[in-house]
């Protein structure tokens, strides 16, 4: 389990300022959901966490070790402790599910007997036992998400990052995905960051919820606290109404 600290994070693309001094912490073993309307910068935070982009200012520290900046070795060491579930599962279409899950293990030099054991255990964890021979195209969207999660947990990450995990699936499948996120945390004790605009999902899984608006975190608290918030931006977003200070796109 690792603790994440984001301190005064700024990022602009050209003249567009996306993050304007984001301050956020994620405690060890916690599930933190980051919410906000489309284009608010949620995924930009995620890209900073995985080292795809560097901030214009500010730092990200994982267990007190700063990963932003020019120290590529430190960044690689920290990112190697991550598991990531992308919005579209991001499975390799040319590989069957077994080889998709085995991909990261093979890159780490595991022998094939150990890989077989871990892949089968990971498939069982996500309820896909026996699906290893199937291609991604043979699975439903929900099953692909579960296969993507199996690939992520196969490397036994200490931090899991989820990018819109319930987008594009029906409410029943979304409930399955949410239960898996909780199960992964409870089974492996991993710290989890979930980027979402699905409030039903956030209420189900989050220990805390942080709302991003116009590049700043305007609220952090539990699900009960966000329901009772009198912040007009927060209230409008969680109630999903067009009436309020947030303009519809």
Image (cartoon, rainbow, N blue to C red):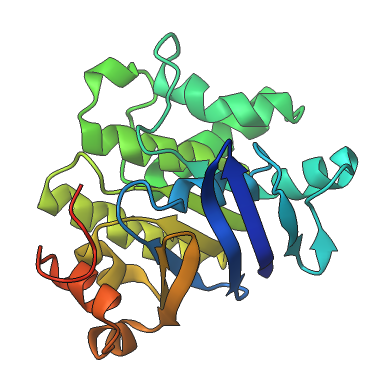
Q: Is residue 112 above or below residue 14?
A: above
Q: Residue furthest front?
A: 15
| Residue 119 horizontal/vertical position (percent) | 51, 35
- 139 or 50: nearer the viewer: 50
Q: Is residue 86 above or below residue 107?
A: below
| Residue 233 horizontal/vertical position (percent) | 28, 74
Residue occupying the point 39% across, 59% down:
181
Examine the rendering and report whether any part of residue 129 can be seen: no
Q: Quadrant of residue 35?
A: bottom left
Residue occupying the point 55% across, 40% down:
15
| Residue 230 horizontal/vertical position (percent) | 26, 89
Which quadrant of the figure contains the N terminus? bottom right
Examine the rendering and report whether any part of residue 220 can be seen: yes
Residue occupying the point 68% across, 69% down:
5
Q: Is residue 39 above or below residue 111?
A: below
- The number of callouts visible is 0
Left of 92 or right of it: where is 145?
left
Left of 147 or right of it: where is 198?
left
| Residue 132 horizontal/vertical position (percent) | 39, 25
Residue occupying the point 38% across, 33% down:
89
Left of 55 or right of it: where is 219?
left
- 5 or 204: nearer the viewer: 5
């Amino acid at each position: 389990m690792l603790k994440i600290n984001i301190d005064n994070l700024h990022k602009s693309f050209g003249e567009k300022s996306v993050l304007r001094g984001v301050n956020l912490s994620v405690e060890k073993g916690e599930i933190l959901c980051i919410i906000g309307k489309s284009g608010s910068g949620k995924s930009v935070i995620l890209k900073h966490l995985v080292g795809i982009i560097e901030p214009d200012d500010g730092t990200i520290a994982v267990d007190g070790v700063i990963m932003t900046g020019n120290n590529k070795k430190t960044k690689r060491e920290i990112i190697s402790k991550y598991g990531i579930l992308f919005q579209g599962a991001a499975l390799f279409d040319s590989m069957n599910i077994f080889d998709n899950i085995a991909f990261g293990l093979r890159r780490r030099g595991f022998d094939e007997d150990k890989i077989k054991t871990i892949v089968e255990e990971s498939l069982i964890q996500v309820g896909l036992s026996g699906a290893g021979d199937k291609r991604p195209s043979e699975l439903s969207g929900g099953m692909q998400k579960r296969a993507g999660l199996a690939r992520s947990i196969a490397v036994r990450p200490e931090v899991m990052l989820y990018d819109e995990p319930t987008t594009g699936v029906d409410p029943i499948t979304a409930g399955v995905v949410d239960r898996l996120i909780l199960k992964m945390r409870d089974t492996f004790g991993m710290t989890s960051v979930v980027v979402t605009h699905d409030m039903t999902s956030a209420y189900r899984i989050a220990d805390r919820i942080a709302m991003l608006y116009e590049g700043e975190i305007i609220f952090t608290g539990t699900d009960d606290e966000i329901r009772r918030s009198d912040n007009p931006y927060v209230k409008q977003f969680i109630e999903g109404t067009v009436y309020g200070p947030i303009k519809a796109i």
